[in-house]
Amino acid sequence: MDLKIGAVQTAAIHRYGEVRRQTQKVGETRGQADKLDISRSAGLFAEALAAAKEAPPVRDARVSEVRAAVDKGAYFVNSRLVAAKILEQAGGA
């Protein structure tokens, strides 16, 4: 049986060598302590998730009622009441 080594086999052999060297490097770091870095976006996501879990439940019936009124063009907002509520919550009224 004749075995010929071509470019494909040679590339595979080189890749095997690279993987083996990388594996050895990983083995050399086993004595070090583990480290975890959490990105800023992951931290923000965790904060948002916690806030969502603490939020009051959604009143599905009221949401449906308002959505239907908006679709009919029959939902109007009193801008003075909205502004007053915003100021009240911000501590300005």
Image (cartoon, rainbow, N blue to C red):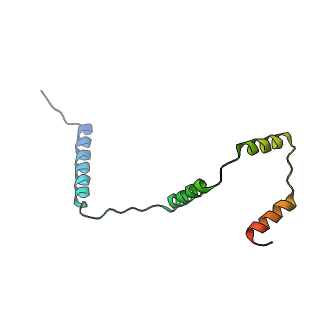
Pick the front one: 11 or 30: 30
For this orientation, the residue located farthest to the bottom is 92
Q: Position of residue 1 (x, y in %)?
A: 12, 26
Q: Position of residue 6 (x, y in %)?
A: 23, 36
Q: Position of residue 49 (x, y in %)?
A: 56, 55
Residue in the picture at 78% in, 73% down: 92
36 with respect to 2 (left or right): right
Q: Is residue 17 above or below residue 45?
A: above
Kindly indicate the quadrant of the structure image that contains residue 69.
top right
20 with respect to 89 (left or right): left
Residue in the picture at 76% in, 45% down: 62
Kindly indicate the quadrant of the structure image that contains residue 51.
bottom right
Residue in the picture at 29% in, 64% down: 33
Pick the front one: 82 or 39: 82
Q: Is residue 7 above or below residue 56?
A: above
Q: How many marks?
A: 0
Kindly indicate the quadrant of the structure image that contains residue 9.
top left
Q: Is residue 92 above or below residue 82?
A: below
For this orientation, the residue located farthest to the left is 1
For this orientation, the residue located farthest to the top is 1
Q: Position of residue 93 (x, y in %)?
A: 81, 72
12 with respect to 90 (left or right): left
Residue in the picture at 22% in, 43% down: 13
27 with respect to 73 (left or right): left
